[in-house]
Amino acid sequence: RRFLASKEQFHAYLRAGGQPCGQAGGEGEDEVEKKEDEVEKKEDEVGSCLSEPPAKRLRSEDLSQDGERREDAGAAEKEPAERKRARGQNKSRPCMKPNHYEQSRLCPSVTQGCAEKCYFGPRCRFLHDVGEYMAAKPADLGRSCVLFETFGKCIYGVTCRFAQAHLGDGYQNVVNTDLAKQWEGKSLVRNNLSKDLQHQLRKRKFSFRKADEYLRGLAKPHGSGGKGDKATGCSTEEQEVSNCTAPHEGLGDSPQCSVLPEPGEDPKPDALQSPGPTGSEEASAIKTAGSVTDEDTIKLRAREKKKLEIQGKLYLAPLTTCGNLPFRRICKRFGADVTCGEMAVCTNLLQGQSSEWALLKRHHTEDVFGVQLEGAFPDTMTKCAELLNQTIEVDFVDINVGCPIDLVYKKGGGCALMTRSNKFEQIVRGMNSVLDVPLTVKIRTGVQEKINVAHKIIPKIREWGASMVTLHGRSREQRYTRSADWDYIAECAKIASPMPLFGNGDILSYEDANRAMQMGVSGVMIARQVPVGALIKPWLFTEIKEQRHWDISSSERFEILKDFTSYGLEHWGSDTQGVEKTRKFLLEWLSFLCRYIPVGLLEHLPQKINERPPYYMGRDYLETLMASQNVDDWIKISELLLGPVPTSFTFLPKHKANSYR
């Protein structure tokens, strides 16, 4: 109880820099109260932006035409809004672009030492004068560059925000040749998108031979004619729509279809593939080298596929936004056995979008790694699976059938596939037929809260060829509220046998993990739900393996954040853009980390994942600062690691519930 505090005491302590309120720099009580009023006023302004978009608020004020003052009307409207729980995404949050950070940027050709070969030619809008750039460049953030110290060379040269560590006379980039030779030819990050592959995807010249063969098999029932179709239970119109990816699916301005042509029309190539010849023409179009073996012509049997042996291992779930490569490296260091990339949309991958392909990157320390795909139709999902099978290194591919957000659900993806069994079956069978690695599926208990359907779907998924199922013990309607239903997960684990089933939901301590394993599941997935597990305490993997509660100190937690920033600068770059991208993802993570309550302060163990911590004073200033729910305090922590934020910097977390005051 001695650590509990009121909201006013908590924020006053942080504003005073860790000193008791009466000793805050010798200021009088009136001055302190005045400052507190100003800060509270500022917090109210920011808080009002979080609660309701400005345009909507102004409109509601304009509509109050009665005799009341607008201020009174606003106060009356504000009262119920405060009772309403903040949920959903901050869709109107500001988007900071690179030109917000740097008005004058140096041309990449100068950084790479080939200024005479500028890619943009006379139209180049970037600076080519290094002296002019250095005169306007902000001050360096530190004296040591993580890239130079790790690899012996910093590829960002003069644009590096730690450039003083490796710049010589005349702004020449210094190279530690001995250290650089050790890393020469080694690939630390795999699954990069090459320019050649991106060009093939954008020009639709990539060959999807196996996927086309499977999709032609699906299209055969169309020939039966009539209004309906017995094989799929859908009308012809419905099948045509389901095989189309509309513009809102992210495939450009016009619909991309794989529908059979009308009688009398010339057959047109699929929008996502090159023109596909048939018969002997198709065989001659495939380039071969040497003699044709059985391996080239005979399809792998299910038993001959690579097995996914991860029973009993700790699985870090795919974490949208926060499950980036630097964070996975942190979790891997603390004992995560299996890692998975962030959810990637299959249509964006087929278009060759660099931002989507970045989600598939794999660090060399990730020994068991998979990727998660989201899609709604067999054509795009099957082609995407074949594309990844040929171009990247993964140990398994996961289908996201658990995403509850409206953007995905309304397009027929995520949880919606649980209600579209025909399309679900076609997707699983199609992807399994083109993959050489195991296929896994992540599902929820169902769509509606009190109607569980997972126990009916799991035997079908096993029959369709999936190697493993992960079940999140909540429905779509529940999202991440209330407790996960582990009794139902245990029931489904028996039904799934002999196929492995991993349980997911409400794991925040080794005791939670032990109880979950006693339910008969093959393993536990530690995820990022709101509430979260791995994002609140990434050292949870160590606790589970060592069967103990770790009373981790604030200085140890700060060292974890230091490592994250080092990994971030290594991954996203040490120039201004890389620093600010690292800061952005650090702040998103801090919006979860602040929910952790130190073990030494708890009245009873363990901390429950659904419990919101009260205001409390930590054992030192840093521990109190890390417990703050205030965005400004998260920014203060980021400044301790990455230097001062740029002018006009703003940040709002992706989820509204992460920034309550």
Image (cartoon, helix red, strand yellow):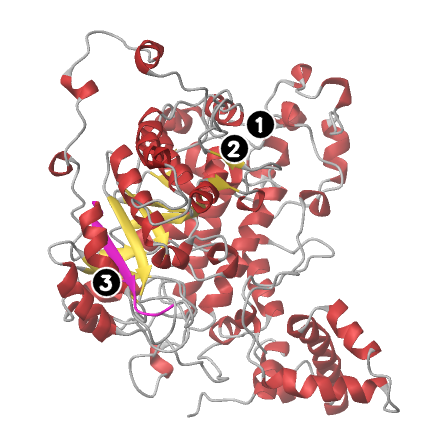
Residue sitting nearer the eye, 377 or 223: 223
List the residue tagged with mark 3. 456
In the figure, 609 relative to 269: above or below? below
Specify the amino acid type for callout 1: Asn
Say which amino acid is labelled 3: Lys
Residue 179 sits in which quadrant? top left
Residue at the spot 42% in from the left edge and 38% down from the top edge: 380
Quarter of the image that includes the N terminus:
bottom left
Whether the magenta-drawn stretch holds residue 457 is answered as no
Answer above or below: position of 396 versus 655.
above
Label 2 neighbour load within 10 Å: few <14, some 14-19, many 20+: many
Whichever of callouts 3 and 1 sits on the residue coming sooner in the sequence is: 1
Residue at 37%, 36% in the rendered image: 222
Across and down, in percent, residue 550 comes to: 29, 71
Specify start and end residues of the magenta stretch as a single range. 465-475
Residue at the disc numbered 2: 154
Mark closest to the chain's N terminus, 2 or 3: 2
Q: What SS does tag 1 mark? A: loop
The answer for how far apart the CA atoms under marks 2 and 3 are is 55 Å
